[in-house]
Image: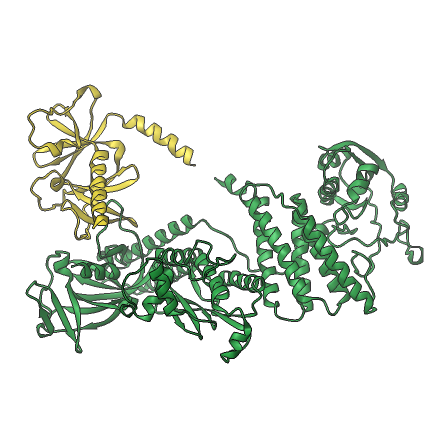
Chain colours: A green, B yellow
Amino acid sequence: MAEDFNTDSMFSMFLFESSQLLEKLEGIILEKQDADCFDDADINEIFRCMHTIKGSAGVMMYDNIMKASHKLEDVFYYLRESHPEDVPHMELVEKVLAVSDFITGELDKLRNGETADGDESKLVEDLDEFLSRIKGEIKKQGIRLPKANKQEEPTQFYVKPVAEDDSHFYKIVIHYRNDTQMSNIRAYSATYALKEVAEDLLYTPEDILSNEASGDVILAEGFHMLLQTKISKEEVLELIDSSEAEKIDFDEITSDEYGKELVNLGREPAPQIVINLEDGVKPAKDDKPAPGDYVVKSKDPGKGKTLAKNQPKQQSIISVNVEKMDALMDLIGELVIAEATVLQNPDLKVPGLDLTNFQKAASELATNTTELQQVIMSMRMMPLTNTFQKMKRIVFDVSRKLDKDVEFEVIGENTEVDKNIIEHISDPLMHLVRNSVDHGIEEDPNERTMLGKPAKGKITLEAKNEGGKVYISVRDDGKGLNAEKLYEKALDKGLIDKPMSDYTEKEIFRFVTLPGFSTKEQVTEYSGRGVGMDVVVKNIQAIGGRLDIDSTLGGGSEMTLVIPLTLAIINGIVVQVGNSPFVLETSSIKQFVRMTQDSLVQEPSGEEYVVLRGEYYPFIRLNEKYELPDSCCNVDDGIVVVLEHEGKQICVLIDKLLQQQEIVVKPIPSYIKKVRGLSGCTQLGDGSIALILDIAGLIQDEERR
Amino acid sequence: MEELKEGLQEQEADAQKGKFMTFQAGKEFFGISISYVKQIIAMQPITVVPEVEDYIKGLINLRGKIIPVIDVRVRFKMEPKEYTDRTCIIVIDVKSTVVGLIVEKIAQVDTIMDDDIVPPPTLGRKDNEQNKYVYGLAKTEDSVKLLIDPEKLIKQEVLEALEELQEEEQE
């Protein structure tokens, strides 16, 4: 099985790494989108991101990704080196996003097993044009222009390596076939392979990665390399990928000849700084390498490797199959039960046993298992940061396309939610945010100022964790929903038939979630593409959540997704009815009350109601409903629980409360048909099974009667 | 790994051919092909699930997996009987549906050749439903064993459940 994980590990690493870098990149860009310019740290960071992507794309031979990232790297190289002022910041942001989108698109293609065949030339042209424009600005400002595409590192001198006795010197010329595609990349991979073994490696043309024309030079003149290494000729030949090579000239030369060849390669020894080492001249290398080229510096053959990794330290993350996580969770559940079996073993109850040491060890074990359980639970939780990041991007794109000035505020992006849920809310949330920009914010800023609102629209995305639920709201300060318009529209479409007075305002707002309802007359590119609010609501309901709509005409609207924190774990109270344990979700419990027979009202039909502080609630005796034996039938002995779901309340009679604990929800085996009022089952600490009551189901059931 | 498992299963299937786990319910002995049997466990505390068929006794916890259990006597329309310490649960796996069968007493594992199995006579039997999952009668030295097809036993349930679901939807 291990092989499965190793196959294409390079490829998946490339995908993973690149997407992470792109995410980071987008993060930086969007954070600074409203600033006037990027600061140095950002520029460096963007430069590094692009540099790494370019490097790995080069190794993986994805030419278009490489070129696009290279061009962007160029732009940032200029910014980094000459600190120009008056760079059109917005345009730059757009350019970066365009490149990031392009690469993301290509990565997606690769991920789906397609080839990365996107055309980068338009992008590159754009960037070139942009670059020359800022260059022009720079010139105008009289700032020194750095040499084209050359890295302004402190001058590096080519230090000729000390020839060791067992070193061989080779002069290698690779002639590729005339029809070879991307000969520069092939040459590059040859140097890459040799770098591992080289004590010294020089090649020409030098700018094989950064200069596309170098490919033609290589085809015409061959690719010249000078190599100093300890390994034999045969081993060297093996390392060079000769599949496309027409012929490879391979000469072993002496150390002296090597020095001369260096000069032939266009590296004149720098006479002014001749330092005599034991064995002669130290030629200076004045052709500085282009950024991104792997520069093999002498004395440090392994340097190329570290270059690729000089990105800043990130939190390291591994992705794990969810099935494995579930298996782990099950195992830990069993461990906890096994622990209970050991610690509460009847054998320990023999009188007169000295258990001091046992108890110490036992409490240690208990601490560890509890912690273990918490860790596995937390492993499933992820912050909403990434999802919110995407929303920033949406607001940015949509507001620019629609030419609306929108401020976007994010609150509580660190709120943690179960991974499964995150996957489900991304699309609905995207839709809500788009809607807010498109339909919420007024088209005409004057309209806003007339109402005394700032000209700039504001959208707030807020997440908070409350009572076992996560509230994610998208709030705008725009037009708000017009209840009258909504009603007319719904009537028009034949979605409703009652007079308007039959509906509350909130109910009318809910019309927008009806299938086939779209208030915007014109379907724009961003909203109303058929996937409407009804789909949003459906998706949210699928994960046990709901959508609340609130709006003030002229003051803005607020759409709130209320979703469970996790699908797998709930905070529950274990109660007993008869001999059966049941679990009630803590968040749906309003209160526990002791009652007397007097507070019950019975209808002739047998239906019962509870009077509680003047209010009437439907009353369910669980033992009767589910025909559970051995239960107390007397209200005086039992406990009444008031449960609430979506504003509807119901009272349930139980025998007694057992405990409160975190419950791992498991489905009832499909073999057993669905019982209304039960949403799942769970394993209690002692290994027994409790059924989880589905409050919504209970209430529905009651309403049907 | 998966392949290896399958290979093993095939080998096992050969060894299991003709072997039947027999158990007693009432006066009769029943047999179930051993290839379905996952394990036999002692009686366990059962959590009752309300509003289900009377023969589904509830859920048990099989080392972290929650599985439903069926009382075979009730399923065969016999009078239910108190559980004793001889009562066992045979855990069977029918096409990935894992179900426990509560039986009064495990008898033994018998080898029954195909030749010894005759289909149950269909004429003149009143108790038709029982025949649906009894697919053969096997004569062994001392007694006649009713061979059960657990697939049918399960399938039937699923169908019933489906029908009920559909009814619900129509409501």
Of residue A335 and residue A191, the one placed in the foreground of this image is A191
Q: Is residue A619 above or below residue A251?
A: below
Q: Position of residue A64 (x, y in %)?
A: 67, 46
Q: Quadrant of the C terminus of chain A?
A: bottom left
Say left or right for A92 vs A365. Answer: right
Q: How many marks?
A: 0
Q: Position of residue A644 (x, y in %)?
A: 25, 67
Q: Residue at x 79, y 66 (%)?
A: A138
Q: Residue at x 8, y 72 (%)?
A: A597
Say left or right for A643 vs A245. Answer: left
Q: Is residue A440 above or below residue A281?
A: below
Q: Is residue B155 above or below residue A279?
A: above
Residue that lies at the very extreme toward the top in this rendered image: B115
Q: Position of residue A512 (x, y in %)?
A: 38, 62
Q: Residue at x 61, y 70 (%)?
A: A34
Q: Is residue A100 above or below residue A41?
A: above
Of residue B75 and residue B156, the one placed in the foreground of this image is B156
Q: Position of residue A657 (x, y in %)?
A: 20, 67
Of residue A56 and residue A34, the one placed in the foreground of this image is A34
Of residue A701 and residue A183, the one placed in the foreground of this image is A701
Which quarter of the figure has residue A171? top right
Say left or right for A221 vs A611. Answer: right
Residue that lies at the very extreme toward the right in this rendered image: A271
Which quarter of the figure has residue A179? top right
Q: Residue at x 15, y 32 (%)?
A: B30
**Does residue A306 appear anywhere in the picture?**
no
**Does residue B150 appear anywhere in the picture?**
yes
